[in-house]
Image (cartoon, rainbow, N blue to C red):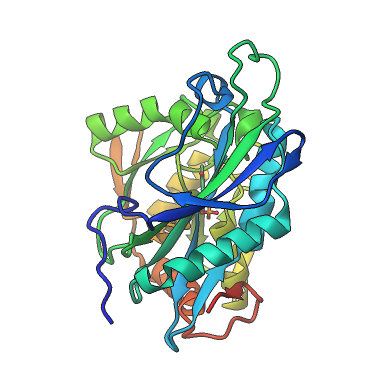
Amino acid sequence: MAREVPAVFGSVFHKDMPVLAFENGAWQSVRWQPADNLQLHPGAHCLHYGSECFEGLKAFRQQNGGVVLFRPDANIARMQQSAKLLGLPVPQTGAFLDALIELVARAADEIPDAPASLYLRPTLIGTDPVIGKAAVGSDNAVLYILASPVGDYFKAGSPMKILVETQHMRCAPHMGRVKCGGNYASALPWVAKARKEYGVHQVLFCPNGDVQETAAANFALIKGGEIVTKPLTDEFLHGVTRDSVLKVARDMGYRISERNFTVEELHEAVENGAEAILTGTAAVVSPVTSFVIDGKEITVAGQERGTAIRKAVTDIQYGAAEDRYGWLVKVA
Ligand SMILES: *Cc1c(COP(=O)(O)O)cnc(C)c1O
């Protein structure tokens, strides 16, 4: 059966959502409610002091008709870490995973065939209805999960032009590994400016020349047989796709170098034929086609290696290659 793919990524939702509330000092059992409405006190902590974090992961319909979740344990662990850093109650692994699996099972008929998927958006918010709590975390919280059938975010051969930004940072350095809306708000002025002034698709944040990531994806340089990417510091988001790409690429024969590198090295490498990729759940791997550095556009020589790495990851997701890493959780 051909299921319809919505024209706009993340604009169509499964009708219901699981809601896990932390109230009176304990996580309550899951409630299912319509996904088009959420009742919240206007004084809720998340609306005033940014006690909000989220996740993004996908479920896939495989070649044999089975439905799987990709690495949900990694996303659950990352939201637990985000919750701790935001002073929010930490979701429980078992109840969180059960809610994800049941949601995917309920929405399974809506998952379009490859290369589309079901995007899942767990969201954790602080709900204390007290605007005086600016200096403390929220005691109460709600975790809900949206499910959204999505098409292939990646379009082979489409341009991916990146502005190399050395003046500004994406977010406060101690918040980099928290997946929260506040960090997107922090990056937005620079991203909006770059799109308007340079017509770029993304901004690569490189404060003081240190190559970090874009507003929503991790970055890696493919220099011959070496993949260079920043080591896991607090300054940037530790992507599940980044980790998957590094593991798959190592098994493809690449040498993985997790080390700091500068815009100077990036610039020189690209002029000498290196490829570059962005990694993230939505597009998996997006090969970069050009960079704007100091106002000058530099074309990337090719996209072949990045495209091959992308295929190696998506083949596992869709069941065209063996899941040697134990990344898939069977739903149906
Ligand atoms: C979500 C996100 C990524 C990508 O993480 P994945 O787990 O691979 O989807 C990268 N950078 C930022 C800032 C993000 O919010």
Q: How many marks?
A: 0
Residue sticking out furthest to the right: 25
On the question of residue 262 being in view, the answer is yes
Q: Residue at x 43, y 85 (%)?
A: 65
State whether residue 257 appears in this view.
Answer: no
Q: Position of residue 311 (x, y in %)?
A: 43, 75
Towards the viewer: 164 or 71: 71
Quarter location, residue 129? top right
Instruction: Answer with left or right where residue 80 lies relative to residue 31.
Output: right
Where does residue 186 sit, x and y in percent of width and height?
47, 26
68 up-or-down from 22: above or below: below
Q: Nearer the viewer, residue 180 or 200?
A: 180
For residue 162, side relative to residue 74 (left or right) = left
Q: Position of residue 259 (x, y in %)?
A: 65, 49
Residue occupying image coordinates x 65% and y 54%: 76
Among the 4 quarters of the image, the one containing residue 326: bottom right
Quarter placement of the N terminus? bottom left
Residue furthest bottom as drawn = 64
Q: Which residue shows up at 45% across the image and 39% down it?
A: 215
Please tell me whether residue 50 is drawn above or below residue 206 in the rendered image. above
Q: Position of residue 267 (x, y in %)?
A: 43, 45
**For the point 68% across and 33% down, which residue is it?**
88
